[in-house]
Amino acid sequence: MTSGGIPAEEIDADLQSRLVNGLFFAGEILDFHGNCGGYNLNWAWQSGQFSGENAAKQILQKRGDTV
């Protein structure tokens, strides 16, 4: 197990910072605990895709594009 990183209380459900608007996080920079052995890689990939999609949606909304 690994530990440390940005506390869960400082991010919202979209993995965006509650302190800095438009700053999204993914992977092991977040302070989530889990088993090693492939699970951490799965978390890195899935959280990366999820936060990237949410960042793109936010950018498109600011530009006035439809999502």
Image (cartoon, rainbow, N blue to C red):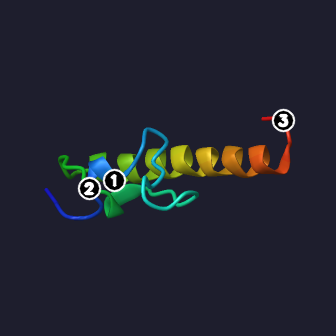
Q: Distance between the residues labelled 1 and 3?
A: 28 Å
Identify the mark nearer the N-term, 1 or 3: 1
SS at mark 1 in the image: helix
Q: Specify the label residue 54 is tagged with.
A: none
Q: Specify the label residue 7 is tagged with.
A: 2
SS at mark 3 in the image: loop
Task: Say whether residue 64 is left or right of residue 50.
Answer: right
Report if the CB atoms under discs 2 and 1 are less than 8 Å apart.
Answer: yes
**Residue 38 seen in the current view:** no
Three-letter code for the amino acid on which mark 1 is drawn: Glu
What residue sits right under mark 3 in the picture? Answer: 66
Three-letter code for the amino acid on which mark 3 is drawn: Thr
What residue sits right under mark 1 in the picture? Answer: 10
Identify the mark nearer the N-term, 2 or 3: 2
Q: In which quarter of the image is the N terminus?
A: bottom left
Horizontal and vertical percent position of residue 30:
32, 57
Residue at left 50%, top 52%? 48
Category of crowding for the residue at label 3, using alpha-carbon neighbours closer than 10 angstroms: few (below 14), some (14–19), many (at least 20): few
Q: Which residue lies furthest to the front in this view?
A: 19
Q: How far apart are marks 2 and 1 (CA)?
A: 6 Å
Q: Which residue lies furthest to the top in this view?
A: 67
SS at mark 2 in the image: loop
Horizontal and vertical percent position of residue 60:
78, 47
Report if the CB atoms under discs 2 and 3 are less than 8 Å apart.
Answer: no
Q: Quick check: 54 above or below 31?
A: above
Task: Say whether residue 17 is left or right of residue 67.
Answer: left
